[in-house]
Image: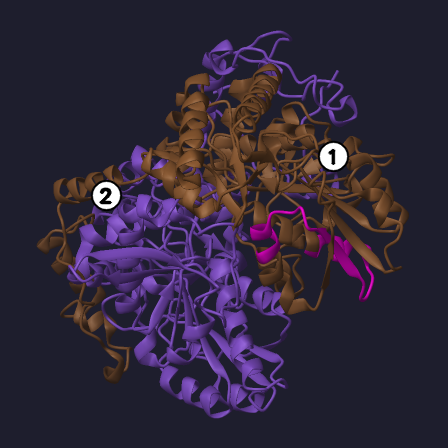
């Protein structure tokens, strides 16, 4: 029996200890009308057979040279990251309720919280959330709690990733919070803060500021933060943590800094895996500590003064507060946090800055190459991090199909004539040349 | 083992892992006002320092791979290594979520089959895999119930009924979905109080959230009546799948009449708990809730040649959906592990899972009560878990459930869930799971008995426990949680 250690003798002796005749008798409290046959599933496979099946299926996956980003990014993951994260002591432990028997996970989470707070320029971070999109929704809910206002609205620029916005809508729609879109400038691809002055007066609870934004473009975060604060809104930075190797941390945006910072932690050592599991992070300034959702680890001592770590501030959480909790979240994203912590420790300040710089450099090089092709123009003028929009003189879908035939996924179609292209440190000059050559061929072909 | 310093204390300025740092390039085309003025405050350590530090930290954890972990309500069973290795194949790991469906037929076909298998196991009409955790599955289920009532113009249904024994996530989820929470009492027998339920239902009732077997480790014997009462009042039934491991292959929530359920794949389907995530919380529904399922789901179309083509199905094809719950497609890596597990175990195997999980729990309960412990529901059959109350030990020796729990750590056992459910004083909620051998259970029983003797002779030994964690001969005493909450120290700062 797979993974069940009992011998026939074990079962018999255990049943007699319990005082029943058979395994069936253990279910005698289930009404007879509800008892079911075993489910009809495919016949069980031995490990050898399932290995063969999964290897065949994995062999069909991917294979193309992909220039996709849009919220999930390919990066080199040092071998040590998953060698350590895959250790059974991390992999098969649970939420560290018994602190003394969970010091490994707890100290690691404390180090993670320190790294995220340091990267974002915030005072503290929680121990992670499910993914960047749900973390952003949690940040919106948190901002509403912090504001202590009834009514009011949350400003979401059109430059925020639409998948994140859709998730926010699902998760906060039940509570009647008004989400107001803030338009972006068609030339720069960023929010034009000078036009915000002309916006109708509203009771703003919170303002999201993406950096870099969905189009890869860098927002004028200082001016936007100051505008948000002038309206009495809490400012929520939605950032790519890897970019913070070189970009200004949200804690330093504008005069007062962002209030909350969240985002997708996937770039920090987590594989693309067709979309998950990833890692949401959420950090804030001290005054909002008790509104922060999710697990938080704190440092404390035992009676002899030895340092140790525990889950703390649990009075915010569902298992204590029930219907009045800050969130219904029960777990964090434990194992992904292990990976992100290892990634950040292995790269260090210099490594992270160099990866971020290489991403920018490579995408800049690629953009220059591609916009040299006839019928390919820059989509926006604004400065960008490692993604950019192209304006194509041919239908994007046919261009992408042509590129795919050449083993390249050229980016994500944003519209019939617009393409979002990403280029990280993983794409060599040879890869970029291959893309440029293929695009040139395809543009000629679909022009013919 | 000496205390492990935090990683920041191991660093030296200027120490760089060149192996992971691409050659330097320029940022000079970017406006300086958008850039950092100082490097990010990360540790500067060598690769060996990182590997050694985190390997040592890992050794300070109890885990299923190293210890019996009878944490009630969490189903801490063995996580087969094959599930991990096969879900981590490079083909699966390296595929971007926005690649065309044609590059993902391997993963999509596996997920499609998983949807079908979970529907069959639970008896529900359809399943969506997209929720990223049990609590998110609960959110999806309750949001679908809300959407159903709204679509019918039934807008007065603002109240969600929740048993007082329920997991904290139930009332928290109902609030998050905009419902008022009303608690339903539990009888002394452990069954839900039907009078209290009849009194509570009415035109304001949106639904009832029920865990079955309940958090008391008991099958809800009147479940058919409960479901009738709520349905007749116009409410829908939500099944919290936390305890599905107890009945898989023996009974199905769909047959009981539930309208929505979530499944914790990190419990019943053996995906790892990872120190607290990532999990996955697929939701299943009855026919009437099918249009509201969260997206994306996986669809399958057969072409003229009889070949299957699998594709993501989104809001465009499913306009009544409650929406998406993550930026992409949920925790696919976790779901692949569940798929591999189910293919190895099969349908009869899933019944054997419930059988042996239940056998182990009832065996432990019988032996421990024989040894003088008090079961909270001694006259009931345990499901896959059961509750001991240490109230007698508290009264006689002055030792609490917490003291017992901490002393168990010294004996090399992770502690059962304590002080949950809230209804039973000084309780231990014990869930052995089917993957533990009789020998391991016997060792646990021996430890419990020994600790009870210690409580009689030297209660201080319990009150000051643990003494030998994480390793014999050294380690931490009981950590001061009050101090941690009163003076929060949440990030490391350089100390003089």
Which of A372/A397 is in front?
A: A372
Q: Is residue B359 left or right of residue B473?
A: left
Vertical position of residue B111 compared to residue B471: above or below: below
Residue B290's label in the rendered image is: none
Magenta highlight on residue A170: no
Q: Which residues are magenta?
A: A141-166
Above-or-below relation of A32 to A78: below
Which chain, by letter, is purple?
Answer: B
Q: Position of residue A167 (x, y in %)?
A: 57, 56
| For residue A144, side relative to residue A310 (left or right) | right
- Front-lying residue, B98 or B245: B98
Q: Which residue is mark 1?
A: A250
Q: x, y percentage for residue B225?
A: 39, 88
Q: Is residue B58 left or right of residue B168?
A: left
- Say left or right for A109 vs A305: left
Q: Which residue is pictured at 20% across the width and 63% down the height?
A: B351
Q: Chain of mark 2?
A: A
Q: Residue furthest left?
A: A8
Return the residue nearer the eye: B8 or B213. B8
Work out whether residue B467 can be spotted: no
| Secondary structure of residue under mark 1 | helix
Label 1 is found on which chain of the structure? A
Within 10 angstroms of label 2, few (less than 14), some, or many (20 or more) residues? many
Q: Earlier in the sequence, mark 1 or mark 2?
A: 2
Query: Which color has been applied to chain A in this rendered view?
Result: brown
Q: Cα distance, mark 1 to mark 2?
A: 42 Å
Q: Position of residue A4 (x, y in %)?
A: 19, 50
Expressed as whole percent of the image width and height from the top left, the position of residue B419 reads 53, 58
Residue beneath disc 2: A57
> What residue is rendered at 57% in x and 24% in y?
A368
């Amino acid at each position: 029996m797979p993974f069940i250690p009992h011998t026939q003798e074990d079962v018999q002796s255990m049943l007699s200890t319990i005082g029943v005749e058979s395994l069936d008798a253990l279910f005698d409290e289930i009404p007879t009308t509800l008892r079911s046959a075993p489910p009809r599933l495919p016949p069980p496979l031995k490990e050898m057979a399932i290995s063969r099946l999964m290897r065949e299926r994995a062999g069909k996956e991917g294979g193309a040279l992909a220039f996709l980003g849009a919220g999930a990014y390919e990066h080199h993951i040092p071998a040590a990251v998953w060698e350590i994260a895959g250790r059974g002591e991390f992999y098969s432990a649970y939420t560290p309720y018994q602190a003394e028997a969970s010091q490994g996970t707890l100290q690691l989470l404390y180090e993670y919280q320190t790294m995220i707070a340091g990267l974002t320029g915030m005072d503290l971070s929680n121990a992670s959330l499910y993914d960047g999109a749900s973390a952003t929704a949690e940040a919106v809910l948190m901002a509403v709690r912090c504001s202590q206002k009834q009514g009011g609205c949350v400003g979401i620029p059109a430059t925020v990733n639409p998948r994140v916005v859709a998730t926010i809508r699902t998760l906060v729609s039940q509570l009647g919070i008004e989400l107001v879109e803030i338009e972006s400038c068609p030339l720069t691809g960023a929010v034009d803060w000078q036009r915000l002055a002309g916006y109708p007066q509203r009771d703003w609870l919170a303002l999201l500021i993406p950096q870099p934004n969905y189009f890869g473009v860098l927002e004028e975060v200082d001016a936007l933060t100051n505008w948000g604060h002038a309206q009495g809104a809490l400012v929520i930075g939605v950032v790519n943590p890897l970019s913070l190797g070189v970009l200004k941390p949200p804690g330093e945006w504008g005069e007062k800094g962002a209030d909350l910072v969240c985002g997708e932690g996937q770039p920090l050592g987590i594989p693309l895996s067709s979309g998950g599991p990833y890692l949401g992070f959420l950090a804030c300034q001290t005054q909002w500590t008790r509104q922060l959702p999710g697990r938080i680890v704190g440092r404390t001592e035992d009676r002899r003064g030895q340092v140790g770590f525990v889950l703390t501030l649990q009075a915010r959480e569902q298992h204590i507060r029930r219907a009045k909790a800050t969130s219904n979240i029960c777990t964090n994203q434990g194992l992904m946090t292990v990976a992100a912590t290892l990634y950040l420790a292995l790269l260090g300040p210099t490594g992270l800055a160099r990866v971020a710089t290489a991403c920018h450099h490579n995408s800049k090089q690629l953009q220059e190459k591609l916009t040299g092709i006839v019928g390919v123009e820059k989509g926006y003028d604004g400065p960008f991090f490692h993604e950019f929009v192209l304006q194509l003189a041919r239908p994007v879908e046919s261009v992408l199909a042509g590129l795919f035939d050449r083993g390249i996924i050229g980016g994500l179609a944003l519209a019939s004539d617009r393409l979002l292209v990403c280029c990280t440190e993983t794409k060599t000059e040879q890869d970029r040349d291959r893309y440029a050559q293929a695009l040139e061929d395809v543009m000629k072909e679909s022009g013919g | 083992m000496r205390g492990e310093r935090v990683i920041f204390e191991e660093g030296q300025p200027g120490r760089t892992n060149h192996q992971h740092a691409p050659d330097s390039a320029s940022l000079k085309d970017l406006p300086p006002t958008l850039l950092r003025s100082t490097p990010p405050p990360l540790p500067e350590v060598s690769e060996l320092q990182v590997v050694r530090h985190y390997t040592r930290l890992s050794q300070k954890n109890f885990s299923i791979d190293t210890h019996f972990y009878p944490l009630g309500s969490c189903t801490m069973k063995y996580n087969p290594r094959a599930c991990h290795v096969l879900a981590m194949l490079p083909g699966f790991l390296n595929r971007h979520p926005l690649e065309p469906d044609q590059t993902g037929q391997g993963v999509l076909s596996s997920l499609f089959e998983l949807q079908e298998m979970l529907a069959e196991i639970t008896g529900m009409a359809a399943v969506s895999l997209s929720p990223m955790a049990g609590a998110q599955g609960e959110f999806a289920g309750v949001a679908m119930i809300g959407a159903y009532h709204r679509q019918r113009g039934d807008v007065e249904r603002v109240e969600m009924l929740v048993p007082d024994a329920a997991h904290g996530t139930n009332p928290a989820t109902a609030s998050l979905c905009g419902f008022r929470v009303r608690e339903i009492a539990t009888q002394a027998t452990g069954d839900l109080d039907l009078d209290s339920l009849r009194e509570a239902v009415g035109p304001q009732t949106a639904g009832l959230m029920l865990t079955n077997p309940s958090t008391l480790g008991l099958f809800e014997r009147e479940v058919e009546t409960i479901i009738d009462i709520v349905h007749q009042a116009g409410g829908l039934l939500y099944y919290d799948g936390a305890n599905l491991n107890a009945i898989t292959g023996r009974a199905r929530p769909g047959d009981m009449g539930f309208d929505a359920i979530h499944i914790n794949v990190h419990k019943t389907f053996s995906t790892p708990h990872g120190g607290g995530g990532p999990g996955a919380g697929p939701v299943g529904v009855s026919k009437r809730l099918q249009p509201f399922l969260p997206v994306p789901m996986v669809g399958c179309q057969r072409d003229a040649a009889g070949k299957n083509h699998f594709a993501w199905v989104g809001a465009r094809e499913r306009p009544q959906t409650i929406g998406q719950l993550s930026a992409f497609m949920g925790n696919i890596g976790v779901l692949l592990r569940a798929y591999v597990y189910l293919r190895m175990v099969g349908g009869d195997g899933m019944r054997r899972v419930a059988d042996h999980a239940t056998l182990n729990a009832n065996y432990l309960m019988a032996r421990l009560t024989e040894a003088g412990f008090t079961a909270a529901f001694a006259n009931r059959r345990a499901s896959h878990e059961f509750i001991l109350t240490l109230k007698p030990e508290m009264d006689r020796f002055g030792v609490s459930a917490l003291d017992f729990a901490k002393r168990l750590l010294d004996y090399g056992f992770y502690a059962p869930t304590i002080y949950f459910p809230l209804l039973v004083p000084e309780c231990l909620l014990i869930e052995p799971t089917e993957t533990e051998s009789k020998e391991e259970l016997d060792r646990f029983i021996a430890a419990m008995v020994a600790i009870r003797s210690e409580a009689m002779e030297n209660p201080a030994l319990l009150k000051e426990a643990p003494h030998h964690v994480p390793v014999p001969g050294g380690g931490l005493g009981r950590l001061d949680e009050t101090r941690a909450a009163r003076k929060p120290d949440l990030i490391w700062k350089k100390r003089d």
